[in-house]
Image (tube, grey):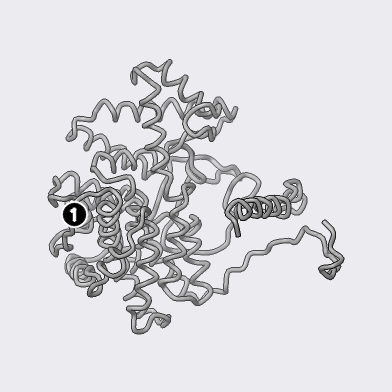
Amino acid sequence: MAEVRFDQILDEYVDFCNEAGKINVNLYEEYNVMRGLRDSNGRGVLTGLTEVSDVKGFEVVDGHRIPIDGELYFQGYEIKDLVKGFDNSKYGYEEATFLLLFGKLPSESQLESFIEVLEDLRQLPESFNRDVIMKAPSRDMMNVLQKCVLTLYTYDSDPNNLDIRNVLMQCLKLIAQFPVMAAYGYQAYRHYYLDKSLVIHRPKKGLSTAENILRLLRTDGKYTELEAKVLDVCLVIHAEHGGGNNSTFTTHVLTSTGTDTYSTVAASLGSLKGPRHGGANIKVQQMFNDLKEHVRDWENEDELRSYLLDLLGKRAFDKSGLIYGMGHAVYSKSDPRAVILKHYAKMLSEEKGLEREFALYERVEHMAAELISENRRTFKDVCANVDFYSGFVYSMLKLPMEIFTPIFAISRISGWSAHRIEELVNNGKIIRPAYKFVGEHKEYLPIEKRDW
């Protein structure tokens, strides 16, 4: 078929899709459909129970929802207390992972054993890097992770066994190997697509997950103590965020079908990849890059306000009308993860000599909150979410933008694993939300009688 003819037919098919797939928006209200599993106020519809984590953005007082500073709990422990408690340890992420999986904070000996387990599992199967990652490099590291996870199914002698012992071992391997797969995927991309030297480091025992990530990604394998500490904090605060976020809900949906761990995690990766979910911090970075091109004086509030109003008015950046990194579905007064990350972003900016850039982020955060409230004519507080500062932190750590979302996945695999095991332990029903048919029932016509 000629290329022009093919394009014409495809364009016609697209028109068919647009015509056949369009649903009258008024029907959602008529049938009380909770679009996006949210009620009319934007709150998530209760679809399950969990003990893994809790996300709080309000309290109910005399029947009224009162916004509070955001709180996030891992197995009942508040994230701020956990991060503070991990302050003198380089293994915060490992300790948080133990907590999420087993419901309790480890003793010193338990943590040492757990770290040894992850170290023993971190190495990929023989020739996996060469045969799976290097022979088919990708421009997208989330695609690399999905491909690697699905391929690991074939290296597993008992992949479909849903016994908790077997699933736990599968999850521990993925937790240990995610940093290696992501780093090797990036090195392959860097070599084959950017024509850079191919540098492959092996993961090293005695190093934390955060230290190994920096070592695997950097040509010289070097990093400062503060850099490793800040990345460790990033991994901790991204490790879990309740059962209702899109990728974790995906974990529950897939697990409820009885499918294998690799298929479940690959689906969760696909969810996290979306720019409305795990890819949001990239949008923040791109937005700030655009801001720097159009605002000459970062300290001039009038210039900044004008640019931010252009963002809201769909006249700047991607013309979406959004100020990326601002606002959250649950938090309104503050996102506890953003509060923590802002503190470490300030520390890192001082080490890197980027205090002026940190001040720009802080200035935009305050101005954007006010302008969004004014623009929407609402009294509801608007706060910076975790994505507002995470991209800036990753940039200061000299992590390539291609690895931003994979870092999220490297962290969140702990939470996904905890939720998968919780779903299996409780033997829940298959998750099957209802959709109402609003089309027309039609009489079948033989092809010779069809007239468009």
Front in this rendered view, residue 151 or 28: 151
Amino acid type at image mark 1: Glu
Front in this rendered view, residue 6 or 313: 6
Q: Position of residue 130 (x, y in %)?
A: 25, 68
Residue sitting at 85 percent across and 59 percent down? 451
Q: Is residue 97 left or right of residue 388?
A: left
Task: Please give the residue where the numbered disc 1 appears in the rendered image.
Answer: 211
Q: Position of residue 199 (x, y in %)?
A: 17, 56
Q: Position of residue 442 (x, y in %)?
A: 84, 65
- Say above or below: 428 vs 48: below
Q: Quadrant of the C terminus?
A: bottom right
- Say above or below: 220 vs 121: above
Disc 1 element: helix
Front in this rendered view, residue 340 or 191: 191
What is the crowding at mark 1: few (fewer than 14 residues within 10 Å), some, or many (at least 20)?
many
Q: Quadrant of the N terminus?
A: bottom right
- Say above or below: 239 vs 102: above
Q: In the rendered image, is residue 47 in sight?
A: yes
Q: Is residue 397 left or right of residue 282?
A: left
- Say above or below: 12 vs 317: below
Residue sitting at 77 percent across and 58 percent down? 438
